[in-house]
């Protein structure tokens, strides 16, 4: 994504200790914009460029856009504007506001807009959600050769925009409130977008180990989804990190492709269910390493080695798997709606079979929804189902009827 892309025009000049430099790098990373990074603490030419740009002063980050223009210590809004990202809505009220632009959000948006429902999509990072950061989607129907995540995201965005969906990028939703029939969606820049209905398509985030190298090799040896990426490791050895049910089950699944699967857990034994542990023990092509912590991932352009540390002895060793799959849990991106809609014990949004939450006019679809299957195709399917349910919810409005009765209770839709 960053640093080593073949032709990055954009260069960020900064240092390791500078918080604004980290923010700028994170912003470009989230927007999937390629850049080169120069650490001016170790690069004299870089420091000279910074000083020249600032009339002799050392103000960082300096961002050189390669077209003769630079930004010095810019805000996120300035960077978004420079990159041509739309962050301002054209109106203050829509029929539907969709929060999140992954496959669930954009599919719902295009279904809704195609039926004449005025729809705004608000996205805090790059358009396309997790599907956009996927190296290659090999299992989305309709793409027999597979499709890169980036291309898939771009196609979704274009299709939604063709039907008139308005899409805001780099805009984080910070709160949702109710005002009678209206739902008010507030963003970090201080704007509020009104609507009759809101779709939560917030997705979820695979928990990461947070060790050096992990981030650099995501999609290039480091993976978080066996169904998605297991087939890339046909005939190779793979390492699974984690000791619970998902690590065990995904490890077993990976034996369909890999020649050998090693599970590494930091606990003294697997914490997966008895059935899963027994199945693993029966397999000659699986083994389990206990009391080991992953401390580093090494490689050049692809993962080459994983450094493990024995938690009892402190001794370090290296493994050289073809790929590493991390299964240490999944966090739904639902902090925003905690206390607003009903969540299950793990924080996923609870809905009825029509994707409706317990709050009238607030729907949920995709990976953030309790019971979802965490796949791009099913997220898109849930988005379509939610749009149809939302259309039904909005129908009385088209006839001029209120959504709530005089006591503020939701009307029952048929
Ligand atoms: C590395 C990787 C590889 C994968 N490979 C595959 C694969 O090969 N095949 C497959 O089927 N699936 C794959 N998946 C899973 C697939 O990408 C997800 O199941 C799918 O993207 C879920 O769609 P979604 O719309 O529910 O959520 P997401 O795609 O996660 O989109 C949610 C969006 O909501 C945004 N958001 C969250 N909170 C806010 C907020 N407060 N304000 C504004 N925006 C917000 C997020 O930034 C995000 O863009 C992969 C996932 C990853 C991470």
Image (tube, rainbow, N blue to C red):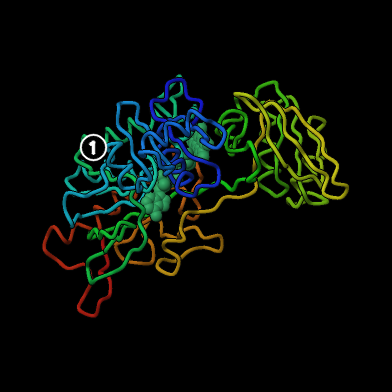
Q: Position of residue 264 (x, y in %)?
A: 76, 41
CB of residue at label 1: within 8 Å of ligand 1? no
Residue count near mark 1 (Cα–Cα under 10 Å), binned few <14, some 14–19, many ≥20: some
In the displayed orientation, state which residue is furthest to the front. 56
Q: Is residue 311 above or below residue 185?
A: above
Q: Is residue 169 visible?
A: yes
Q: Is residue 1 visible?
A: no
For the point 70% across and 50% down, which residue is it?
244
Can you tell me which quadrant of the image ligand 1 is in? top left
Q: Is residue 369 above or below residue 254?
A: below
**Looking at the image, which is closer to me, 254 or 290?**
290
The reply, left or right, for residue 227 in relation to residue 23 is: right
The quarter of the picture where the C terminus appears is bottom left
Q: Pointer 1: what residue? A: 161
**Looking at the image, which is closer to me, 318 or 399?**
318
Q: Quadrant of residue 27?
A: top left
Q: Quadrant of residue 95?
A: bottom left
For the point 16% across and 46% down, which residue is it?
116
Q: Position of residue 22 (x, y in %)?
A: 49, 45
**Looking at the image, which is closer to me, 344 or 322?**
322
Q: Position of residue 235 (x, y in %)?
A: 70, 20
The reply, left or right, for residue 169 in relation to residue 132 is: left
The reply, left or right, for residue 334 in relation to residue 83 is: right
């Amino acid at each position: 994504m960053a640093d080593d892309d073949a032709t990055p025009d954009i260069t960020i000049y900064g240092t390791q200790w500078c918080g604004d430099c980290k923010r700028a790098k994170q912003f470009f990373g989230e927007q999937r914009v390629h850049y080169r990074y120069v650490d001016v603490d170790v690069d004299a030419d870089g420091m000279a460029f910074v000083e020249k740009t600032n009339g002799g002063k050392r103000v960082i980050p300096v961002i050189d856009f390669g077209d003769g223009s630079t930004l010095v210590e810019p805000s996120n809004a300035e960077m978004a504007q420079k990159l041509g990202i739309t962050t301002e809505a054209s109106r203050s009220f829509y029929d539907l506001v969709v929060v999140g632009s992954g496959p669930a959000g954009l599919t719902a948006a295009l279904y809704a807009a195609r039926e004449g429902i005025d729809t705004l999509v608000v996205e805090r990072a790059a358009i396309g959600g997790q599907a956009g950061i996927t190296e290659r989607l090999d299992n989305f129907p309709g793409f027999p050769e597979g499709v890169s995540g980036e291309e898939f995201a771009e196609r979704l965005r274009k299709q939604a925009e063709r039907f008139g969906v308005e899409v805001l990028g780099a805009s984080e939703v910070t709160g949702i409130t109710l005002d009678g029939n209206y739902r008010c969606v507030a963003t970090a820049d201080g704007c509020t977008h009104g609507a009759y209905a809101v779709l939560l398509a917030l997705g979820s985030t695979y928990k990461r180990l947070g060790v050096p190298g992990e981030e650099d090799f995501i999609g290039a040896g480091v993976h978080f989804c066996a169904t998605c990426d297991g087939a890339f490791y046909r005939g190779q050895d793979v390492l699974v990190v984690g000791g619970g049910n998902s690590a065990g089950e995904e490890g077993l699944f990976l034996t369909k492709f890999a020649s050998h699967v090693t599970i590494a857990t930091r606990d003294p034994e697997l914490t997966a269910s008895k059935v899963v542990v027994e199945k693993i023990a029966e397999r000659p092509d699986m083994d389990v390493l206990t009391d080991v912590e992953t401390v580093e991932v090494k490689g050049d352009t692809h993962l080459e080695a994983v450094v493990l540390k024995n938690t009892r002895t402190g001794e370090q060793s290296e493994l050289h798997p073809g790929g590493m799959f991390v299964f240490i849990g999944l966090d739904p991106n639902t902090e925003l709606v905690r206390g607003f809609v009903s969540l299950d014990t793990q924080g996923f949004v609870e809905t009825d079979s029509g994707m409706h939450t317990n709050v009238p006019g607030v729907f949920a679809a995709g990976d953030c929804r309790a019971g979802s299957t965490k796949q791009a195709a099913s997220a898109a399917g849930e988005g379509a189902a939610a749009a149809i349910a939302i259309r039904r919810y909005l129908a009385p409005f088209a006839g001029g009827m209120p959504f709530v009765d005089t006591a503020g209770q939701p009307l029952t839709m048929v």
